[in-house]
Amino acid sequence: MGAANDEMRSRIVVSLIVAASGCGPEGEVSSRSSSELNSAHELNSAQECEWLVAPDPGDPSVALCDVEFREVVRLEGSMEGVAPDHPVQALWDGRYVTGTYSPGRLALWGPDGGLLEVLGTGPGEGPGEFSYANEFAQTSDDEFLVFTGHQLVHRYSTTEGFLRSFRLPTFGGVTGAAAYGDVVVVAAADGWRDLGFQIVGDRVQPQGVIEPTGGVLLLAAGEGVGVWSATAERYVLRRHMWPGGTVVDSLVVNRDWFRGPEGWAAFLGGLQADVRGLIWVVGSSPDPDAPPRRRPRPPAGVEVPITEAELAEGIRYTDLVIDAFTPDGRQVASRRFDTVEETPRPMPGGLWFRPTEDGLSVVVLEALLLAR
């Protein structure tokens, strides 16, 4: 893959990689209130396809479900006030916390989508200070972690604001996070690779989710699903033994779109686990009508900046695909989107979000599996 493709991929990956699901160990949900999510699910369960009673994995007669994304709430920002931005976290009590467009500031929103409070101590590299949040992970009824592009991790309270900071033993910040019981699993940049860590309280320790040089590590965890990871470059979903983190199983997905036409790269940009026990994957796919791409690969070590024309071509011929799988490897749903802007982005707790066209608000969505 040439430097132009690398840069294009990184730009789209940045817009897609979000926190994966934050759920607890077997028998205990520890993300947004399970009763809330299950109640919303039960209201629509009569409409859902019967993926739970489908034939054995690999049976070609199994029909895929349709996926529909329905609005749960709209986090209403304004030009004069605060506009929500990535990341978005559904808290256990039904409120939401989001990033904002203001450096070092977070926003707390009510269950009805109204702005409640602005949190944060502002930009910088000191305790509680950051430019923009990359990920959130809720750790108790009142507290959540804020991850940024810096090694510092910040602990915030929904009632007291900033509490304290601690440091990751890496060269870069967190690129992905998933809460699992009383542990937060994180992937953090360390030079040219991502390393995996466990955070318990304010204690950080390495664990077995380690990505090879150049990899982008995606994480997801959920009740009844376990801890999963994937890399951007391969459509392979890996299940991890916990708490050690060792890979105990791999789900290799054979999707024609992932290979793409000549010269075009496909990659994964998001991973999520939901309360139904499904694993969701967001991938970037070349448009089926994309012409062959023959830009010569530059010599090793030579960076060739991407041009505006190449970036426009990449946007024009890039689709986004959302797939859903059972942990035993059965694909139950798939949906393709034409643009990054219209593609829902996964968020902790099994929900999804999508910024409005004007960039001032965020729509929180639930994914429904409907019979075709």
Image: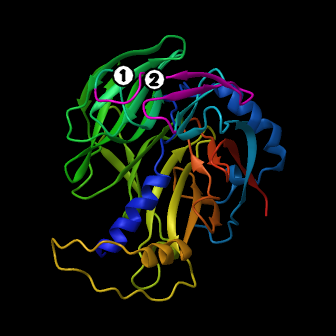
Q: Quadrant of residue 179?
A: top left
Residue 243 magenta-highlighted:
no
Q: Residue furthest top?
A: 160
Q: Quadrant of the N terminus?
A: bottom left
The coloring applied to the image is rainbow
Q: Position of residue 369 (x, y in %)?
A: 72, 53
Secondary structure at badge 2 equals loop
Q: Are marks 1 and 2 in contact (CB under 8 Å)?
A: yes
- Residue ID at (45%, 30%): 180
Tally of marks: 2
Q: Give the distance between the C-alpha atoms of the residues marked 1 and 2, in whole angstroms.
A: 7 Å
Q: Quadrant of residue 349?
A: top right
Residue type at the position of mark 1: Gly
Relative to 94, is 227 on the left or the right?
left
Q: For mark 1, does the 10 Å Cα neighbourhood hold few (<14), some (14 to 19), or many (20 or more) residues?
A: many
- Residue ID at (28%, 24%): 126
Location of residue 165 with respect to 61 vertically, above or below = above
Tell me if residue 56 can be seen.
no
Q: Position of residue 192 (x, y in %)?
A: 21, 54
Q: Earlier in the sequence, mark 1 or mark 2?
A: 2
Secondary structure at badge 1 equals loop
Report which residue position mark 2 lands on. 120
Location of residue 288 with respect to 319 vertically, above or below = below
Relative to 197, is 327 on the left or the right?
right
For this rendering, which residue is in front, 176 or 244?
176
**Label number found at residue 128:** 1
